[in-house]
Image (spheres, rainbow, N blue to C red):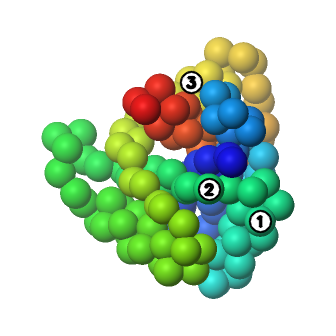
Protein backbone atom coordinates (compact mmCIF):
# COMPACT_ATOMS: atom_id res chain seq x y z
CA UNK A 1 0.00 0.00 0.00
CA UNK A 2 1.15 3.52 -0.80
CA UNK A 3 1.32 6.74 1.18
CA UNK A 4 -0.08 9.97 -0.24
CA UNK A 5 1.60 13.29 0.53
CA UNK A 6 -0.27 16.60 0.26
CA UNK A 7 0.86 20.21 0.37
CA UNK A 8 -2.43 22.09 0.85
CA UNK A 9 -2.79 25.73 -0.14
CA UNK A 10 -5.58 28.22 -0.63
CA UNK A 11 -6.25 27.30 -4.28
CA UNK A 12 -3.80 24.47 -5.06
CA UNK A 13 -2.81 21.19 -3.44
CA UNK A 14 0.48 19.54 -4.36
CA UNK A 15 0.18 15.75 -4.54
CA UNK A 16 2.87 13.08 -4.23
CA UNK A 17 2.73 9.32 -3.70
CA UNK A 18 5.20 6.69 -2.62
CA UNK A 19 6.22 3.64 -4.60
CA UNK A 20 4.40 0.43 -3.52
CA UNK A 21 7.12 -0.34 -0.92
CA UNK A 22 6.86 3.15 0.61
CA UNK A 23 10.53 3.96 0.02
CA UNK A 24 10.49 6.84 -2.47
CA UNK A 25 8.15 9.73 -3.25
CA UNK A 26 7.09 10.96 -6.69
CA UNK A 27 5.09 14.07 -7.48
CA UNK A 28 1.97 13.20 -9.43
CA UNK A 29 -0.15 16.34 -9.76
CA UNK A 30 -1.34 19.69 -8.50
CA UNK A 31 -5.04 19.95 -7.77
CA UNK A 32 -6.42 23.42 -8.51
CA UNK A 33 -9.79 24.11 -6.95
CA UNK A 34 -12.39 26.73 -6.13
CA UNK A 35 -14.44 24.52 -3.79
CA UNK A 36 -12.68 22.36 -1.20
CA UNK A 37 -15.25 19.59 -1.71
CA UNK A 38 -14.10 19.27 -5.34
CA UNK A 39 -10.49 18.89 -4.18
CA UNK A 40 -11.49 16.28 -1.59
CA UNK A 41 -13.31 14.29 -4.28
CA UNK A 42 -10.22 14.39 -6.50
CA UNK A 43 -8.02 13.24 -3.60
CA UNK A 44 -10.46 10.39 -2.95
CA UNK A 45 -10.09 9.27 -6.60
CA UNK A 46 -6.29 9.42 -6.34
CA UNK A 47 -6.37 7.35 -3.15
CA UNK A 48 -8.44 4.71 -4.89
CA UNK A 49 -6.30 4.71 -8.05
CA UNK A 50 -3.02 4.31 -6.11
CA UNK A 51 -4.40 2.07 -3.33
CA UNK A 52 -3.34 4.53 -0.64
CA UNK A 53 -3.28 3.29 2.95
CA UNK A 54 -2.43 6.57 4.71
CA UNK A 55 -2.16 10.27 3.96
CA UNK A 56 0.45 12.79 5.10
CA UNK A 57 -0.49 16.48 5.15
CA UNK A 58 2.03 19.28 5.46
CA UNK A 59 1.46 21.42 8.54
CA UNK A 60 3.06 24.89 8.15
CA UNK A 61 4.04 25.63 11.74
CA UNK A 62 5.58 28.99 12.60
CA UNK A 63 9.37 29.09 12.78
CA UNK A 64 9.18 28.89 16.60
CA UNK A 65 7.04 25.74 16.34
CA UNK A 66 3.76 27.41 17.30
CA UNK A 67 0.50 27.03 15.38
CA UNK A 68 -0.57 30.00 13.29
CA UNK A 69 -3.57 30.55 11.00
CA UNK A 70 -2.09 28.44 8.17
CA UNK A 71 -1.40 25.56 10.57
CA UNK A 72 -4.96 25.69 11.88
CA UNK A 73 -6.26 25.54 8.29
CA UNK A 74 -4.07 22.49 7.62
CA UNK A 75 -5.45 20.81 10.74
CA UNK A 76 -9.05 21.45 9.62
CA UNK A 77 -8.19 20.16 6.14
CA UNK A 78 -6.68 17.01 7.66
CA UNK A 79 -9.80 16.41 9.73
CA UNK A 80 -12.04 16.74 6.66
CA UNK A 81 -9.80 14.25 4.86
CA UNK A 82 -10.08 11.76 7.76
CA UNK A 83 -13.87 11.93 7.61
CA UNK A 84 -14.00 11.69 3.80
CA UNK A 85 -11.38 9.00 3.21
CA UNK A 86 -11.71 6.88 6.36
CA UNK A 87 -7.89 6.57 6.31
CA UNK A 88 -5.20 7.61 8.77
CA UNK A 89 -4.19 11.22 8.10
CA UNK A 90 -0.92 12.37 9.66
CA UNK A 91 0.15 16.00 9.98
CA UNK A 92 3.88 16.63 9.56
CA UNK A 93 5.85 19.80 10.17
CA UNK A 94 6.55 21.24 6.75
CA UNK A 95 8.43 24.40 7.64
CA UNK A 96 10.51 25.60 4.68
CA UNK A 97 9.46 22.84 2.24
CA UNK A 98 8.05 25.36 -0.25
CA UNK A 99 11.20 27.47 0.06
CA UNK A 100 13.29 24.31 -0.37
CA UNK A 101 11.32 23.37 -3.47
CA UNK A 102 11.88 26.85 -4.89
CA UNK A 103 15.65 26.70 -4.22
CA UNK A 104 15.91 23.27 -5.84
CA UNK A 105 14.18 24.47 -8.98
CA UNK A 106 16.26 27.65 -9.19
CA UNK A 107 19.43 25.57 -8.85
CA UNK A 108 18.14 23.36 -11.66
CA UNK A 109 17.64 26.38 -13.92
CA UNK A 110 13.85 26.25 -14.04
CA UNK A 111 12.18 29.39 -15.37
CA UNK A 112 9.89 31.42 -13.10
CA UNK A 113 6.83 30.06 -14.95
CA UNK A 114 7.99 26.44 -14.63
CA UNK A 115 8.76 26.96 -10.93
CA UNK A 116 5.28 28.29 -10.28
CA UNK A 117 3.76 25.23 -11.98
CA UNK A 118 5.93 22.67 -10.17
CA UNK A 119 6.46 24.23 -6.71
CA UNK A 120 3.39 22.68 -5.01
CA UNK A 121 4.08 19.22 -6.44
CA UNK A 122 7.74 19.32 -5.35
CA UNK A 123 6.74 20.58 -1.89
CA UNK A 124 4.43 17.53 -1.59
CA UNK A 125 7.38 15.28 -2.50
CA UNK A 126 9.53 16.94 0.17
CA UNK A 127 6.75 16.53 2.77
CA UNK A 128 6.42 12.85 1.90
CA UNK A 129 10.22 12.39 1.98
CA UNK A 130 10.29 13.93 5.47
CA UNK A 131 7.65 11.47 6.63
CA UNK A 132 9.37 8.45 5.03
CA UNK A 133 12.72 9.32 6.62
CA UNK A 134 11.10 9.90 10.05
CA UNK A 135 9.55 6.41 10.19
Mark 2–mark 1 CB contact (< 8 Å): no
Nearer-N-terminus badge (2/1): 1
Badge 2 is on which residue? 53
Looking at the picture, does residue 39 appear above or below residue 31?
Answer: below
Task: Give the mark nearest the N terminus, 1 or 3.
Answer: 1
Looking at the rendered structure, the secondary structure element under dot 1 is: helix
Spatial separation of the CA atoms under disc 1 and disc 3: 33 Å
Residue 103 numbered tag: 3
Q: Residue at x 43, y 55 (%)?
A: 90
In the picture, the quarter occupied by the C terminus is: top left
Direction right: furthest residue: 49
Q: Is residue 14 visible?
A: no
Q: Is residue 107 left or right of residue 55?
A: right
Classify residue 89 as left or right of residue 22: left
Left or right of 10 on screen, residue 27: right
Alpha carbon distance from label 3 to label 2: 31 Å
Say which residue label 1 marks: 48
Amino acid sequence: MRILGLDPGEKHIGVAVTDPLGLTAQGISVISYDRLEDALNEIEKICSRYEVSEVVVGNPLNMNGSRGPASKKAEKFAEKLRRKLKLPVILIDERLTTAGAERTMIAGGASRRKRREARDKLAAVLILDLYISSR
